[in-house]
Image: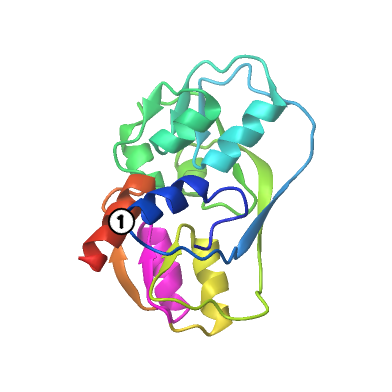
Amino acid sequence: MTRPAGQADELTRRLEELGHEVAHCPLIVLEPLGDDPVDVSGYDWVVLTSANAARELRRRLRGTPSRVAAIGRATADAFGGADLVARVSTQEGLLAELPRPAGRVLFAGAEGARRLLADELAADVVPLYRTVELEPEEPPTGDLVVLASASAARAYGRTGATVPAVSIGPETTAAARTAGVEVLAEAETHDLDGLVAAVAAIAG
């Protein structure tokens, strides 16, 4: 398990219920980028592409958003709900479902996040946190590694470990393969349920 400390409990529990032994080797840490309020008044849409961004925006929120679009159910739940939840949990999937013209849009996400949505919607961008990739003292060991972000995939590739991976989605898969990681499966739904199902399918 490579997710940040404190964010792997539910996935760990579900994998253990399937009979797997789960070891933790966090490969990323998240750093908030300040405490100043983020004023969402005047925006037609606030777009959220990660649960971490949703939690950070809730912490710093000023005003009431007109409408909120989330990349997936976990992101919507982290914010406390959303008016639109993408059926396909990618930026492309969310972009396809947003009405056009979208009006004035605020994109709240990670520093260095993909800019597809922001550029297509001419959105204002507020970076709320940064992802720092870690280098563990010893390469992870096991039979399967679970990669839930492109940053974790890159960090894992740098360890030189050869344990094959399950990926949460296409961006993570692409980053893993670029880093020389063997990807055995990609989650069909790019969320916790999809990861669990992918691991279960491999385990047979």
Q: Position of residue 71 (x, y in %)?
A: 42, 38
Decide: is 115 above or below 124. Answer: below
Q: Amino acid at mark 1?
A: Ala
Is there any visible trace of residue 191 in the rendered image?
Answer: no
User: What residue is rendered at 29% in x and 48% in y?
Assistant: 189
Give the left or right position of residue 41, taking residue 96 as reference.
right
Give the left or right position of residue 184, taking residue 161 as reference.
left
State how many labels appear. 1
Residue nearer the viewer, 90 or 45: 90
Which residue position holds label 1?
187
User: What residue is rendered at 65% in x and 35% in y?
Assistant: 56
Residue 126 is covered by the magenta coloring:
no
Q: Dot 1: what SS?
A: loop
Q: Position of residue 87 (x, y in %)?
A: 29, 37
Residue 173 is covered by the magenta coloring:
yes
Give the magenta-colored segment's residue range: 163-181
User: What residue is rendered at 44% in x and 72% in y?
Assistant: 176
Is there any visible trace of residue 198 in the rendered image?
Answer: yes
Q: Quadrant of residue 15?
A: bottom left
Query: Pointer 1: residues within 10 angstroms few (<14), some, or many (20+)?
Result: many
